[in-house]
Amino acid sequence: MSTKKIIVIFLLLIFSSNPSFAIKDIRKENTNINYKYENVNIDWWKSYNDAYLTGYIEKAIKDNNDLQVSTLKVEQARQNIKLRFAKELPNAQIGFSPALYKTPFTNSTSSSLSVPIVVNYEADVFLKNRDKTKSMKKLYEAQKIQERAAYIAISSQIGATYFNIVGLDRLIALQKQLIEDRKNIYELMKIRNDYGLTSTADLTKAEKSYVLSVADLSDLEKAREILLRSLAVLIGESPENINNIKRVSYDKMVELQTIPNEILSEVIVKRPDYLIAEKMIEKSGLDVKIAKKEFLPTINIFGVYSFNSIHGAGGMGWENALMALAGSAMLDVFKGGAKIANLRLKKNLYEQTVQNYYKTNLIAIKEVNDALCALKFDNNKYEKNLKSYNMQEKDYYYTKIKYSDGLISQLDLIQQRENLLTTNKLVISSKINCYINQISLYKAVGGNL
């Protein structure tokens, strides 16, 4: 048989033993940014009709550091698949080996030049390497889902932080009015105290309320500044640029979205953590399968093709070629029980993964129900506070009429307005809580609202 025929047979043997070679590779994922908008369900965020909020989420998709790291981890997992896939392919090397030697009982020196080509290949007859690549691919798929979870988590943080800032803007404005009213109350009561119309105890109480309201304003302003810095970091901005963060006015916020009576169980199986748990079960199953195949023999094919040019022997022609083709089937007879222990370990990890899957399912149901329950109760609280505010507003309206008719003092009017402002603060806080709970529900269902 000629040398060329032997080479052809050798290459066909390698290619045919691994059908995935040269015909299948891990294709690069579409790097289009549109899938990132799908991860956060951008259409749901647009339902708030707030260009500032939507803009901050879109900016975070491009600039948030945690999201960038999450995307890079996906690429890292993809490259790990390629590294694993490379082990399914032959390993070929080519060398260059010049030599200068002198044989005994001669006075002349000889030289030679060898160009060896060495090919090693583990024939994947039992598809052990293929299963290892599949196992690695499950990690890649899980990382992609983890990336989606990161986008949902960051967008939820942005939404909650943004609405809290909007609420604090309004609360700070009301607190300043409240401070002004309590200051006026204190000054009026001081005058009345000078005339003996108000006790010193009541005056001290009024002064205390005024001082406490000033302290409350400081707390509100501190909370807003902290949240502004947090929002800046979330959208990839410097915390020093908080003055450039724009937001909608509280009065222009859209009405609360309709609260669903129930959440279908099908939504739970679309949560990222649930999908990741499924992928890990699939991976653990493959790892058990691989551990069993470790008991099977390893089949290797080894080939060498070398040109050896010896001084005065006609250069590197076919007559100076050397070729060797060999194969082996190796079976481990004794490894100190390592393979048995490895199989038991993989089975144990599989059982742990199954239990984690069950736990993830229970946690998913709990979180969805908790978020829905909180939303319903807080919405009910908001409606009651709003009803109370409307009644308080009517009282204040009639109080102003009485004041215009001279039936009550200015002190009584200001005290009534103080009650109105206090009730209004409760309305704002409960309404913002409802917005936060909507976002919690969005996160609990994996963005599938």
Image (tube, rainbow, N blue to C red):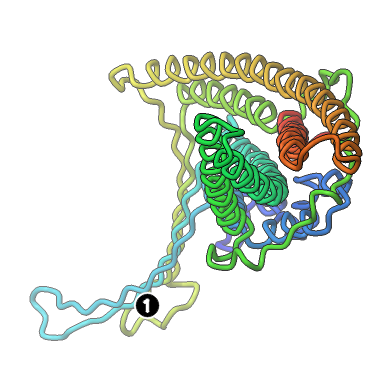
The residue tagged 1 is 309
Residue positioned 84% across, 21% down in the render = 263
Is 37 left, or right, of 137 in this rendering?
A: right
User: Foreground: 44 or 6?
Assistant: 44
Residue 74 place in picture, x, y as percent: 61, 49
Is 145 left, or right, of 382 in this rendering?
A: left
Q: Is residue 155 visible to the viewer in this orientation of the structure?
A: no
Determine whether 100 is above or below 212 in the image.
Answer: below
Is 107 left, or right, of 213 in this rendering?
A: left
Determine whether 303 is above or below 428 in the image.
Answer: below
Determine whether 247 is above or below 347 in the image.
Answer: below
User: Foreground: 246 or 137?
Assistant: 246
User: Foreground: 112 or 221?
Assistant: 221
Residue positioned 53% across, 26% down in the render = 287
Which quadrant, please, contains the C terminus?
Answer: top right
Residue positioned 39% across, 69% down in the render = 95
Q: Is residue 318 visible to the viewer in this orientation of the structure?
A: yes
